[in-house]
Amino acid sequence: MEITYDYYRIFYFVAKYQSFTQAANVLNSNQPNLTKYINNLENQLSCKLFVRTNRGVSLTPEGEKLYAHVAVAYEQLKAAELELANDKNLESGVVTIGVSNTALHGILLPVLSQFHEKYPKIRLRLSNQTTPQAVQALKNGTVDFSLVTTPLHLKRPFLETGLKNFQEILIGSHQYKSLAKKPLSLAEVAQYPLICLGKNTTTREFYNTFYSTHGLVLMPDTETATTDQLLPLVKNNIGLAFIPEEFAREAIEKGEVIPIPLLQKVPTRTICIVEDNSRHLNIAANKLKQMILEVKG
């Protein structure tokens, strides 16, 4: 006879209530059935677990030892079942995301607001990183998925799904308003100070390629760590910068910066969700991912 979970579950309740009758009521069973299980368990373990008393049953020394272990195991199993049930109902859980600055502002923040409103008990952990760092975090298994921008160079089991295209434009402060009169070539832009993201970022790789395609070498005068630092630097007359159009729209409408037209249009880029196909997402992370995919556009 193989001892199964049911044997230890019945033993747990008989020992807890010190009564076959009470345990049978809790388990929706009957006393003879429980007695049979306990007899089989005692035979299998070759020891007596209970002795009968006037009030019911009490544990033998061997039974006390067994109960000390079974009680811990049973309570841990019940806690795990409750945790899984809460996860299923999105009453608990943690979602960890690696996200680049452009992806954070370009698509994630509005979705996070909706998600947090619907599932306030889910904990969110965001790592604001460059695209290479966010992809590496996914490879290291420290995030559930990452939201990043192209260009990407991924191999299986990593999968990218495009979410939203965005267009970058060249902007400058009013110090450079004369440049808005007619489209400039990239060669002409090179005559002015340029602000760009630093090396080892996807944006820097993108513009290195863009310049190289037109026979130029990108040599920025000012390097910054994140996209959200570009606009303040432009406003303070540090130089020109390429920035996602929607990030600059409000500043343009307020007259704080001006768009500078180019002869060579900057290629469109894409915000993507990147995941490891070899891993299964937890329920909360999968729900957030589905909400992100729903706003794909």
Image: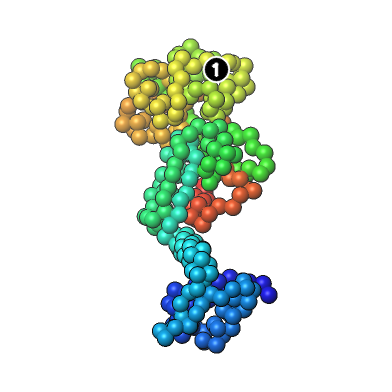
Please indicate whether residue 276 sits to the left or right of residue 24 in the image: right
Of residues 127 and 222, the one nearer the viewer is 127
The residue lying furthest to the front in this view is 61
Of residues 24 and 139, the one nearer the viewer is 24
Q: Is residue 165 visible from the viewing direction of this image?
A: no
Q: Residue at x 53, y 46 (%)?
A: 144
The image quadrant of residue 265 is top right
At which x and y percent is residue 171? 42, 25
Q: Residue at x 51, y 63 (%)?
A: 69
Asked if 282 appears above or below 265 in the picture, the reply is: below
At which x and y percent is residue 202? 55, 29
Q: Is residue 160 visible from the viewing direction of this image?
A: yes
Q: Amino acid at mark 1?
A: Leu
Asked if 23 appears above or below 201 in the picture, the reply is: below
Q: Which residue lies under the disc numbered 1?
A: 218
Q: Residue at x 48, y 74 (%)?
A: 59
Q: Residue at x 48, y 45 (%)?
A: 96
